[in-house]
Amino acid sequence: MEIPVAAVVANFSWELLWSWCFHTNLGELFQWGYRIWFFMDIFIIYSIFKYGYKQFQLEPFKKQSVVITAFGLAFWMIGLYFLIPEHDTDGFGAFSAYLINTYMSAFYCYQIIRQPEFGISKANGWFKMIGTAGCSAMIYNHFWNIPGYKGLMALCAITLFLDLLYIYLQYSLVRERSKDGKISFIPA
């Protein structure tokens, strides 16, 4: 699994809540879009439970990866359940989604440095950045002049910066496999 466990539990929790507990003001088509995305991500969450232990570096955490992942899901679901009604005033989850997106982008950067064998492909890095930048442009266009959304604008900018940093890390650091089979980075 290339996606960091910490990112998956946050993202899946958001999708579960926006699919079934909260309703978007963008109409039923978007609501079902959230639900379809939720069902597609069931495979990812299943894979994290099955293979996520490989991302943990300490043996005790590897052995308890399923429990840690389950607690991560529970904590994110509880936190988001109470955060969303108070802070997602846009009606479609942009603030909580960008909070998680920023978190995910930070974990991608951390993971590519800490565990280079789990870095996602360059194409996926670009697609994530382009997709997020497109959403950010729409949010910027819609919310820029509305009071109370500067925090959302900041999250959009921070996420873009982290996505660009991730792409930079992919191109500027070369993965090198040592004689013992470990992968490390060296400057390009």
Image: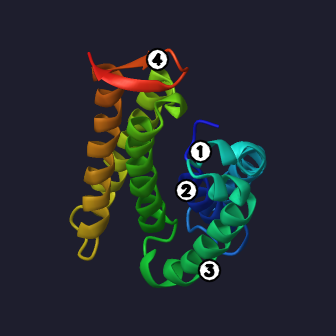
Residue 121 in the image, given as x and y percentages of width and height:
50, 24
Q: Earlier in the sequence, mark 4 or mark 1?
A: 1
Q: Earlier in the sequence, mark 3 or mark 1?
A: 1
Please name the residue shown 64% across and 52% down the image: 59
Mark 3 lies on residue:
78
Q: Tell me the kind of residue under disc 1.
A: Gln
Please name the residue shown 32% across and 29% down the image: 169
Disc 2: CA contacts within 10 A as few (<14), some (14-19) or many (>=20): some
Left or right of residue 118: residue 95: left
Q: Tell me the kind of residue under disc 2.
A: Ala
For the residues labelled 3 and 2, the Cα–Cα distance comes to 15 Å
Residue 179 appears in view: yes
Q: Which mark is residue 43?
A: none
Query: What secondary structure is marked by label 3?
Result: helix
Residue 129 against residue 17 in the figure, above or below? above
Name the front one of labels 4 and 2.
4
Query: What secondary structure is marked by label 1?
Result: helix
Residue 44 against residue 130 in the figure, above or below? below
Name the front one of labels 4 and 3.
4
For the residues labelled 3 and 1, the Cα–Cα distance comes to 24 Å
Q: Tell me the kind of residue under disc 4.
A: Ser
Disc 1: CA contacts within 10 A as few (<14), some (14-19) or many (>=20): many
Q: Tell me the kind of residue under disc 3.
A: Ile
Mark 4 lies on residue:
178
Q: Which mark is residue 55?
A: 1
For the residues labelled 4 and 2, the Cα–Cα distance comes to 28 Å
Q: Quadrant of residue 129?
A: top left
Q: Which mark is residue 6?
A: 2
